[in-house]
Amino acid sequence: MLAVSYAAAAAAMLVAVLYLFLRLRPFISTTTILLGSLLIIYGPACLSYTLSSGEHSFLINRLTGVLLGPGEVFSRISAKVPDLDAVIVAMNLSLALMYLCIIAGIEIVGKFAPRAVAVAEIAKSNWTGQSLQDDVGNDRILLVTISALALFMLAISVAEHHLSTISNFFSIKGDNGARDLFRLRFGGSPIYLYRLIVTAVAPMFVIMGILAGILRRSWAILLVTFLLFAATLIGKIETLSKAPPALFLLQLMLAALLARTNRISWRFALSGSVIAFLVIYTVASLIMIFPEQNSSIRAVYSRVFEAENESLLENFATFPFMHPFMWGAGIRPIAALIGTPLIHSDSLVAYTWIGSHDVTNPSLFIADAWANFSYLGVILSSVALGMICRSIDLTFLARGKSVVGIAVLGATFLGVFALLTTPLNVALFSGGLLLAPMLAAILAMTTRHLAAKSSPQGSPGKH
Protein backbone atom coordinates (compact mmCIF):
# COMPACT_ATOMS: atom_id res chain seq x y z
CA MET A 1 0.00 0.00 0.00
CA LEU A 2 2.91 2.33 0.68
CA ALA A 3 4.19 2.02 -2.90
CA VAL A 4 0.66 2.55 -4.25
CA SER A 5 0.32 5.75 -2.20
CA TYR A 6 3.58 7.13 -3.57
CA ALA A 7 2.46 6.27 -7.10
CA ALA A 8 -0.91 7.97 -6.52
CA ALA A 9 0.70 11.12 -5.12
CA ALA A 10 3.26 11.29 -7.93
CA ALA A 11 0.55 10.74 -10.57
CA ALA A 12 -1.63 13.50 -9.07
CA MET A 13 1.33 15.88 -9.05
CA LEU A 14 2.03 15.08 -12.70
CA VAL A 15 -1.63 15.74 -13.54
CA ALA A 16 -1.37 19.09 -11.71
CA VAL A 17 1.73 20.04 -13.70
CA LEU A 18 0.07 19.16 -17.01
CA TYR A 19 -3.10 20.98 -16.01
CA LEU A 20 -1.09 24.02 -14.97
CA PHE A 21 0.71 24.40 -18.29
CA LEU A 22 -1.78 22.93 -20.78
CA ARG A 23 -5.15 23.95 -19.35
CA LEU A 24 -4.48 27.08 -17.28
CA ARG A 25 -1.55 28.01 -19.53
CA PRO A 26 1.56 29.89 -18.36
CA PHE A 27 -0.10 33.13 -17.23
CA ILE A 28 0.05 34.56 -13.72
CA SER A 29 -3.26 34.16 -11.90
CA THR A 30 -4.46 33.12 -8.46
CA THR A 31 -5.00 29.56 -9.66
CA THR A 32 -1.55 29.25 -11.26
CA ILE A 33 0.08 30.72 -8.14
CA LEU A 34 -1.88 28.22 -6.05
CA LEU A 35 -0.92 25.10 -8.02
CA GLY A 36 2.63 26.32 -8.60
CA SER A 37 3.36 27.02 -4.93
CA LEU A 38 1.83 23.71 -3.82
CA LEU A 39 3.95 21.81 -6.34
CA ILE A 40 7.11 23.61 -5.22
CA ILE A 41 6.68 23.02 -1.47
CA TYR A 42 4.42 19.96 -1.27
CA GLY A 43 5.26 18.29 -4.57
CA PRO A 44 8.40 16.24 -5.24
CA ALA A 45 10.05 17.88 -2.21
CA CYS A 46 7.44 16.25 0.01
CA LEU A 47 7.93 12.82 -1.56
CA SER A 48 11.71 13.07 -1.29
CA TYR A 49 11.37 14.09 2.34
CA THR A 50 9.47 10.97 3.33
CA LEU A 51 11.46 8.69 1.02
CA SER A 52 14.69 9.88 2.67
CA SER A 53 13.20 9.35 6.16
CA GLY A 54 13.39 13.06 6.81
CA GLU A 55 17.13 13.39 6.29
CA HIS A 56 18.16 17.01 6.84
CA SER A 57 19.13 18.81 3.59
CA PHE A 58 18.66 15.58 1.65
CA LEU A 59 19.14 16.94 -1.88
CA ILE A 60 22.09 19.14 -0.90
CA ASN A 61 23.66 16.14 0.84
CA ARG A 62 23.41 14.08 -2.33
CA LEU A 63 25.17 16.81 -4.29
CA THR A 64 27.94 17.11 -1.70
CA GLY A 65 28.29 13.40 -0.93
CA VAL A 66 27.18 13.72 2.72
CA LEU A 67 24.99 11.11 4.43
CA LEU A 68 23.19 12.05 7.65
CA GLY A 69 20.57 9.33 8.05
CA PRO A 70 16.96 9.65 9.23
CA GLY A 71 15.86 13.00 10.60
CA GLU A 72 14.93 13.73 14.18
CA VAL A 73 11.22 14.10 13.39
CA PHE A 74 11.08 10.63 11.82
CA SER A 75 12.81 9.10 14.84
CA ARG A 76 10.49 10.88 17.26
CA ILE A 77 7.36 9.78 15.39
CA SER A 78 8.60 6.19 14.99
CA ALA A 79 9.10 5.97 18.75
CA LYS A 80 5.42 6.80 19.39
CA VAL A 81 3.62 5.50 16.29
CA PRO A 82 4.25 1.78 15.61
CA ASP A 83 3.06 1.90 11.98
CA LEU A 84 4.82 4.87 10.38
CA ASP A 85 3.98 3.52 6.92
CA ALA A 86 0.27 4.05 7.64
CA VAL A 87 0.98 7.71 8.43
CA ILE A 88 2.85 8.20 5.16
CA VAL A 89 0.12 6.38 3.20
CA ALA A 90 -2.54 8.71 4.65
CA MET A 91 -0.45 11.77 3.88
CA ASN A 92 0.36 10.69 0.31
CA LEU A 93 -3.26 9.85 -0.50
CA SER A 94 -4.41 13.17 1.00
CA LEU A 95 -1.93 15.05 -1.16
CA ALA A 96 -3.18 13.19 -4.24
CA LEU A 97 -6.78 14.05 -3.35
CA MET A 98 -5.82 17.66 -2.72
CA TYR A 99 -4.38 18.20 -6.20
CA LEU A 100 -7.21 16.40 -7.98
CA CYS A 101 -9.96 18.12 -5.99
CA ILE A 102 -8.46 21.60 -6.47
CA ILE A 103 -8.52 20.94 -10.22
CA ALA A 104 -12.11 19.69 -9.89
CA GLY A 105 -13.09 22.89 -8.06
CA ILE A 106 -11.54 25.03 -10.78
CA GLU A 107 -13.38 23.10 -13.48
CA ILE A 108 -16.72 23.29 -11.63
CA VAL A 109 -16.60 27.09 -11.73
CA GLY A 110 -15.75 26.96 -15.43
CA LYS A 111 -18.76 24.75 -16.15
CA PHE A 112 -21.13 27.20 -14.47
CA ALA A 113 -19.53 30.37 -15.91
CA PRO A 114 -18.23 29.54 -19.42
CA ARG A 115 -18.65 33.12 -20.69
CA ALA A 116 -16.64 34.54 -17.80
CA VAL A 117 -13.92 31.97 -18.47
CA ALA A 118 -13.77 32.98 -22.16
CA VAL A 119 -13.54 36.68 -21.29
CA ALA A 120 -10.83 36.06 -18.68
CA GLU A 121 -8.82 33.89 -21.07
CA ILE A 122 -8.87 36.60 -23.74
CA ALA A 123 -7.88 39.22 -21.18
CA LYS A 124 -4.96 37.09 -19.96
CA SER A 125 -3.76 36.44 -23.50
CA ASN A 126 -3.85 40.15 -24.41
CA TRP A 127 -2.43 41.36 -21.09
CA THR A 128 1.12 42.11 -22.21
CA GLY A 129 0.03 44.28 -25.14
CA GLN A 130 -2.42 46.32 -23.09
CA SER A 131 -1.83 49.65 -21.39
CA LEU A 132 -2.37 49.71 -17.65
CA GLN A 133 -5.97 50.75 -16.93
CA ASP A 134 -6.83 52.99 -14.00
CA ASP A 135 -10.03 51.39 -12.71
CA VAL A 136 -9.80 52.56 -9.10
CA GLY A 137 -12.19 55.46 -9.67
CA ASN A 138 -12.60 58.30 -7.20
CA ASP A 139 -9.31 59.91 -6.08
CA ARG A 140 -10.75 61.05 -2.81
CA ILE A 141 -11.91 57.61 -1.65
CA LEU A 142 -8.54 56.02 -2.41
CA LEU A 143 -6.70 58.90 -0.72
CA VAL A 144 -8.86 58.74 2.40
CA THR A 145 -8.64 54.93 2.60
CA ILE A 146 -4.84 54.81 2.31
CA SER A 147 -4.43 57.75 4.70
CA ALA A 148 -6.68 56.13 7.31
CA LEU A 149 -4.81 52.83 7.09
CA ALA A 150 -1.40 54.54 7.34
CA LEU A 151 -2.37 56.73 10.30
CA PHE A 152 -3.94 53.81 12.19
CA MET A 153 -0.93 51.58 11.65
CA LEU A 154 1.61 54.27 12.52
CA ALA A 155 -0.36 55.12 15.69
CA ILE A 156 -0.23 51.47 16.80
CA SER A 157 3.48 51.25 15.96
CA VAL A 158 4.23 54.34 18.06
CA ALA A 159 2.01 53.22 20.95
CA GLU A 160 3.59 49.75 21.04
CA HIS A 161 7.18 50.99 20.47
CA HIS A 162 7.72 48.82 17.40
CA LEU A 163 10.97 50.51 16.37
CA SER A 164 12.38 49.91 19.84
CA THR A 165 11.30 46.25 19.68
CA ILE A 166 13.02 45.82 16.31
CA SER A 167 16.18 47.54 17.55
CA ASN A 168 16.36 45.40 20.69
CA PHE A 169 15.86 42.23 18.63
CA PHE A 170 18.73 43.01 16.27
CA SER A 171 20.95 43.97 19.20
CA ILE A 172 21.01 40.29 20.19
CA LYS A 173 24.17 38.89 18.64
CA GLY A 174 25.38 35.33 18.30
CA ASP A 175 22.49 33.66 20.13
CA ASN A 176 19.63 32.40 17.97
CA GLY A 177 17.94 30.85 21.01
CA ALA A 178 17.78 34.24 22.71
CA ARG A 179 16.30 35.74 19.55
CA ASP A 180 13.69 32.98 19.46
CA LEU A 181 12.68 33.68 23.04
CA PHE A 182 12.54 37.43 22.35
CA ARG A 183 10.39 36.79 19.26
CA LEU A 184 8.04 34.55 21.23
CA ARG A 185 7.57 37.21 23.90
CA PHE A 186 7.60 40.46 21.93
CA GLY A 187 7.10 39.63 18.24
CA GLY A 188 3.88 40.91 16.66
CA SER A 189 1.16 43.18 17.94
CA PRO A 190 -1.49 41.83 20.34
CA ILE A 191 -4.15 43.80 18.42
CA TYR A 192 -5.87 41.48 15.94
CA LEU A 193 -7.21 44.27 13.70
CA TYR A 194 -3.70 45.68 13.28
CA ARG A 195 -2.27 42.25 12.45
CA LEU A 196 -5.07 41.68 9.95
CA ILE A 197 -4.41 44.98 8.20
CA VAL A 198 -0.64 44.44 8.10
CA THR A 199 -1.03 40.96 6.66
CA ALA A 200 -4.07 41.03 4.39
CA VAL A 201 -5.12 44.59 3.63
CA ALA A 202 -2.26 47.10 3.60
CA PRO A 203 -0.10 45.39 0.91
CA MET A 204 -2.99 45.52 -1.57
CA PHE A 205 -3.52 49.23 -0.98
CA VAL A 206 0.22 49.90 -1.22
CA ILE A 207 0.21 48.36 -4.70
CA MET A 208 -3.02 50.12 -5.62
CA GLY A 209 -1.70 53.48 -4.39
CA ILE A 210 1.63 53.22 -6.23
CA LEU A 211 0.04 52.29 -9.56
CA ALA A 212 -2.85 54.77 -9.31
CA GLY A 213 -0.56 57.55 -8.11
CA ILE A 214 1.83 57.05 -11.02
CA LEU A 215 -0.96 56.85 -13.61
CA ARG A 216 -2.70 59.96 -12.27
CA ARG A 217 0.54 61.76 -11.46
CA SER A 218 -0.90 62.42 -8.02
CA TRP A 219 1.78 63.35 -5.50
CA ALA A 220 -0.81 63.28 -2.71
CA ILE A 221 -1.64 59.60 -3.36
CA LEU A 222 2.04 58.70 -3.72
CA LEU A 223 2.90 60.48 -0.46
CA VAL A 224 0.28 58.71 1.65
CA THR A 225 1.13 55.43 -0.10
CA PHE A 226 4.77 55.88 0.94
CA LEU A 227 3.58 56.35 4.55
CA LEU A 228 1.48 53.19 4.25
CA PHE A 229 4.45 51.32 2.77
CA ALA A 230 6.65 52.42 5.71
CA ALA A 231 3.99 51.50 8.25
CA THR A 232 3.48 48.10 6.60
CA LEU A 233 7.19 47.34 6.44
CA ILE A 234 7.58 48.23 10.11
CA GLY A 235 4.66 45.96 10.94
CA LYS A 236 6.12 43.10 8.91
CA ILE A 237 9.58 43.41 10.46
CA GLU A 238 8.09 43.80 13.96
CA THR A 239 6.81 40.22 13.74
CA LEU A 240 10.53 39.37 14.06
CA SER A 241 10.01 36.54 11.57
CA LYS A 242 11.68 36.19 8.20
CA ALA A 243 8.64 35.32 6.07
CA PRO A 244 6.45 38.47 6.42
CA PRO A 245 8.98 41.06 5.17
CA ALA A 246 10.30 38.71 2.47
CA LEU A 247 6.82 37.96 1.13
CA PHE A 248 5.90 41.66 1.22
CA LEU A 249 8.88 42.49 -0.99
CA LEU A 250 7.95 39.63 -3.32
CA GLN A 251 4.38 40.98 -3.52
CA LEU A 252 5.71 44.34 -4.70
CA MET A 253 8.01 42.65 -7.22
CA LEU A 254 5.11 40.60 -8.56
CA ALA A 255 3.01 43.76 -8.96
CA ALA A 256 5.87 45.47 -10.83
CA LEU A 257 6.11 42.47 -13.15
CA LEU A 258 2.35 42.37 -13.75
CA ALA A 259 2.41 46.04 -14.74
CA ARG A 260 4.43 44.82 -17.74
CA THR A 261 3.48 41.22 -18.44
CA ASN A 262 1.64 38.24 -16.97
CA ARG A 263 3.30 35.58 -19.10
CA ILE A 264 5.41 32.90 -17.37
CA SER A 265 8.36 31.91 -19.55
CA TRP A 266 11.21 29.58 -18.68
CA ARG A 267 13.46 32.63 -18.41
CA PHE A 268 10.96 34.26 -16.06
CA ALA A 269 10.62 31.08 -13.98
CA LEU A 270 14.39 30.74 -13.61
CA SER A 271 15.10 34.40 -12.87
CA GLY A 272 12.06 34.62 -10.56
CA SER A 273 13.24 31.60 -8.59
CA VAL A 274 16.71 33.11 -8.19
CA ILE A 275 15.31 36.48 -7.10
CA ALA A 276 12.88 34.85 -4.65
CA PHE A 277 15.70 32.76 -3.17
CA LEU A 278 17.93 35.82 -2.81
CA VAL A 279 15.18 37.80 -1.08
CA ILE A 280 14.38 34.95 1.31
CA TYR A 281 18.06 34.25 1.91
CA THR A 282 18.86 37.92 2.62
CA VAL A 283 15.93 38.39 5.00
CA ALA A 284 16.63 35.07 6.73
CA SER A 285 20.29 36.03 7.17
CA LEU A 286 19.20 39.25 8.88
CA ILE A 287 16.59 37.62 11.14
CA MET A 288 18.33 34.35 11.98
CA ILE A 289 21.73 33.59 13.48
CA PHE A 290 23.07 30.45 11.84
CA PRO A 291 25.27 28.02 13.79
CA GLU A 292 28.82 27.79 12.48
CA GLN A 293 28.41 24.11 11.63
CA ASN A 294 25.26 24.80 9.59
CA SER A 295 25.56 26.90 6.44
CA SER A 296 22.96 29.58 5.82
CA ILE A 297 22.07 28.00 2.46
CA ARG A 298 21.33 24.67 4.14
CA ALA A 299 19.27 26.43 6.81
CA VAL A 300 17.18 28.35 4.26
CA TYR A 301 16.71 25.21 2.14
CA SER A 302 15.61 23.27 5.21
CA ARG A 303 13.19 25.99 6.30
CA VAL A 304 11.57 26.37 2.89
CA PHE A 305 11.42 22.76 1.68
CA GLU A 306 11.67 20.56 4.77
CA ALA A 307 10.16 22.32 7.78
CA GLU A 308 6.71 22.48 6.18
CA ASN A 309 6.80 18.81 5.27
CA GLU A 310 8.01 17.91 8.77
CA SER A 311 5.02 19.75 10.19
CA LEU A 312 2.66 18.04 7.75
CA LEU A 313 3.98 14.61 8.74
CA GLU A 314 3.58 15.44 12.44
CA ASN A 315 -0.03 16.47 11.80
CA PHE A 316 -0.87 13.24 10.00
CA ALA A 317 0.92 11.22 12.67
CA THR A 318 -1.21 12.87 15.35
CA PHE A 319 -4.63 12.19 13.77
CA PRO A 320 -5.89 9.53 14.25
CA PHE A 321 -2.82 7.64 15.48
CA MET A 322 -2.22 9.69 18.65
CA HIS A 323 -5.55 11.50 18.91
CA PRO A 324 -8.97 10.70 17.41
CA PHE A 325 -10.36 12.85 14.62
CA MET A 326 -11.99 15.98 16.02
CA TRP A 327 -15.12 15.86 13.81
CA GLY A 328 -15.59 19.62 13.76
CA ALA A 329 -14.30 20.50 17.24
CA GLY A 330 -11.49 22.46 15.57
CA ILE A 331 -13.92 24.75 13.68
CA ARG A 332 -15.50 27.42 15.89
CA PRO A 333 -19.08 27.45 14.45
CA ILE A 334 -19.29 23.65 14.40
CA ALA A 335 -17.78 23.34 17.88
CA ALA A 336 -20.38 25.79 19.19
CA LEU A 337 -23.15 23.90 17.38
CA ILE A 338 -22.20 20.50 18.80
CA GLY A 339 -21.46 21.96 22.24
CA THR A 340 -17.78 21.08 22.56
CA PRO A 341 -14.82 23.30 23.48
CA LEU A 342 -12.87 24.67 20.52
CA ILE A 343 -9.68 22.69 19.95
CA HIS A 344 -6.90 24.12 17.80
CA SER A 345 -5.36 21.21 15.93
CA ASP A 346 -1.97 22.93 15.53
CA SER A 347 -1.70 23.43 19.30
CA LEU A 348 -2.65 19.80 19.90
CA VAL A 349 -0.03 18.63 17.41
CA ALA A 350 2.64 20.79 19.05
CA TYR A 351 1.76 19.43 22.48
CA THR A 352 1.85 15.85 21.16
CA TRP A 353 5.37 16.13 19.76
CA ILE A 354 6.95 19.01 21.68
CA GLY A 355 5.07 18.81 24.96
CA SER A 356 4.10 22.48 25.12
CA HIS A 357 0.82 24.36 24.72
CA ASP A 358 2.70 27.65 24.33
CA VAL A 359 3.64 27.00 20.70
CA THR A 360 1.73 25.90 17.62
CA ASN A 361 2.63 23.56 14.79
CA PRO A 362 1.02 25.12 11.69
CA SER A 363 0.90 23.21 8.44
CA LEU A 364 -0.73 22.96 5.02
CA PHE A 365 -4.47 23.69 4.95
CA ILE A 366 -5.37 20.03 4.41
CA ALA A 367 -3.76 19.14 7.75
CA ASP A 368 -6.52 20.91 9.69
CA ALA A 369 -9.14 19.51 7.30
CA TRP A 370 -7.74 16.01 7.90
CA ALA A 371 -7.70 16.51 11.69
CA ASN A 372 -11.38 17.46 11.66
CA PHE A 373 -12.97 15.25 8.99
CA SER A 374 -10.36 12.80 7.64
CA TYR A 375 -10.44 12.33 3.86
CA LEU A 376 -13.83 14.05 3.59
CA GLY A 377 -12.29 17.24 4.98
CA VAL A 378 -9.43 17.07 2.50
CA ILE A 379 -11.85 16.63 -0.42
CA LEU A 380 -14.29 19.38 0.55
CA SER A 381 -11.66 21.97 1.49
CA SER A 382 -9.69 21.35 -1.71
CA VAL A 383 -12.74 21.61 -3.96
CA ALA A 384 -13.81 24.81 -2.18
CA LEU A 385 -10.31 26.28 -2.54
CA GLY A 386 -10.21 25.58 -6.27
CA MET A 387 -13.62 27.19 -6.72
CA ILE A 388 -12.69 30.29 -4.71
CA CYS A 389 -9.41 30.90 -6.51
CA ARG A 390 -11.00 30.42 -9.93
CA SER A 391 -13.83 32.78 -9.02
CA ILE A 392 -11.35 35.47 -7.95
CA ASP A 393 -9.59 35.19 -11.31
CA LEU A 394 -12.81 35.38 -13.31
CA THR A 395 -13.94 38.42 -11.34
CA PHE A 396 -10.78 40.53 -11.54
CA LEU A 397 -8.76 39.26 -14.51
CA ALA A 398 -11.63 39.83 -16.93
CA ARG A 399 -10.80 43.54 -16.71
CA GLY A 400 -7.38 42.93 -18.26
CA LYS A 401 -4.30 44.77 -17.07
CA SER A 402 -5.80 47.05 -14.42
CA VAL A 403 -4.72 48.66 -11.17
CA VAL A 404 -7.30 46.79 -9.09
CA GLY A 405 -6.57 43.47 -10.84
CA ILE A 406 -2.83 43.73 -10.16
CA ALA A 407 -3.43 44.78 -6.54
CA VAL A 408 -5.76 41.83 -5.99
CA LEU A 409 -3.25 39.38 -7.52
CA GLY A 410 -0.58 40.80 -5.23
CA ALA A 411 -2.84 40.24 -2.23
CA THR A 412 -3.92 36.73 -3.22
CA PHE A 413 -0.26 35.83 -3.73
CA LEU A 414 0.18 36.22 0.03
CA GLY A 415 -3.14 34.50 0.70
CA VAL A 416 -2.00 31.45 -1.23
CA PHE A 417 1.21 31.27 0.78
CA ALA A 418 -0.87 31.51 3.96
CA LEU A 419 -2.55 28.27 2.85
CA LEU A 420 0.80 26.53 3.09
CA THR A 421 0.85 26.97 6.87
CA THR A 422 -2.72 27.67 8.02
CA PRO A 423 -6.24 26.22 7.80
CA LEU A 424 -8.39 27.28 4.85
CA ASN A 425 -10.68 29.57 6.87
CA VAL A 426 -7.69 31.40 8.34
CA ALA A 427 -6.02 31.87 4.96
CA LEU A 428 -9.25 33.17 3.41
CA PHE A 429 -9.68 35.99 5.90
CA SER A 430 -6.60 36.55 8.09
CA GLY A 431 -4.34 35.67 5.14
CA GLY A 432 -6.34 37.87 2.78
CA LEU A 433 -7.05 35.29 0.07
CA LEU A 434 -10.75 36.16 0.09
CA LEU A 435 -10.82 39.25 2.32
CA ALA A 436 -8.63 41.39 0.04
CA PRO A 437 -10.66 40.71 -3.14
CA MET A 438 -13.86 41.43 -1.20
CA LEU A 439 -12.49 44.81 -0.04
CA ALA A 440 -11.34 45.59 -3.60
CA ALA A 441 -14.83 44.78 -4.90
CA ILE A 442 -16.43 47.01 -2.24
CA LEU A 443 -14.05 49.86 -3.15
CA ALA A 444 -14.87 49.48 -6.86
CA MET A 445 -18.64 49.40 -6.25
CA THR A 446 -18.46 52.44 -3.97
CA THR A 447 -16.50 54.52 -6.47
CA ARG A 448 -18.83 53.51 -9.31
CA HIS A 449 -21.86 54.43 -7.20
CA LEU A 450 -20.44 57.85 -6.37
CA ALA A 451 -19.45 58.41 -9.99
CA ALA A 452 -23.00 57.58 -11.12
CA LYS A 453 -24.48 59.99 -8.57
CA SER A 454 -22.21 62.83 -9.65
CA SER A 455 -22.71 62.17 -13.38
CA PRO A 456 -24.58 64.93 -15.28
CA GLN A 457 -26.89 62.23 -16.67
CA GLY A 458 -28.10 61.54 -13.19
CA SER A 459 -29.18 65.15 -12.56
CA PRO A 460 -32.40 66.73 -13.87
CA GLY A 461 -32.09 68.69 -17.05
CA LYS A 462 -32.75 72.43 -17.37
CA HIS A 463 -35.57 73.82 -19.52
Image (spheres, rainbow, N blue to C red):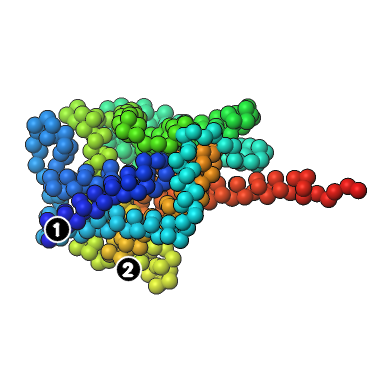
- Amino acid type of the residue tagged 1 in the rendering: Val
User: x, y (%) of residue 461?
Assistant: 85, 48
**On screen, residue 245 above or below 9:** above
Instruction: Give left or right: position of 91 versus 261.
Output: left
How many numbered discs?
Answer: 2
Q: In which quarter of the image is residue 59?
A: top left
Where residue 394 appears, as percent x and y from the top left, is 48, 50
Residue at image coords 42%, 46%: 30
Q: Which amino acid does label 2 sit on?
A: Trp
Q: Residue furthest right?
A: 463
Q: Is residue 167 left or right of residue 420?
A: right
- Front residue of this view, candidates 457 and 379: 457
* Label 1 element class: helix
Question: Would residue 422 be visible to someone looking at this image?
Answer: yes
- Residue 4 marker: 1
**Of the pair 334 and 393, the residue shown nearer to us:** 393
Residue placed most toward the observer, 87 or 81: 87
Question: Which tag, 1 or 2, sits closer to the chain's start?
Answer: 1
Callout 1: 10 Å neighbours few (<14), some, many (20+)?
few
Tag 2 residue: 327
Residue lying farthest bottom? 338
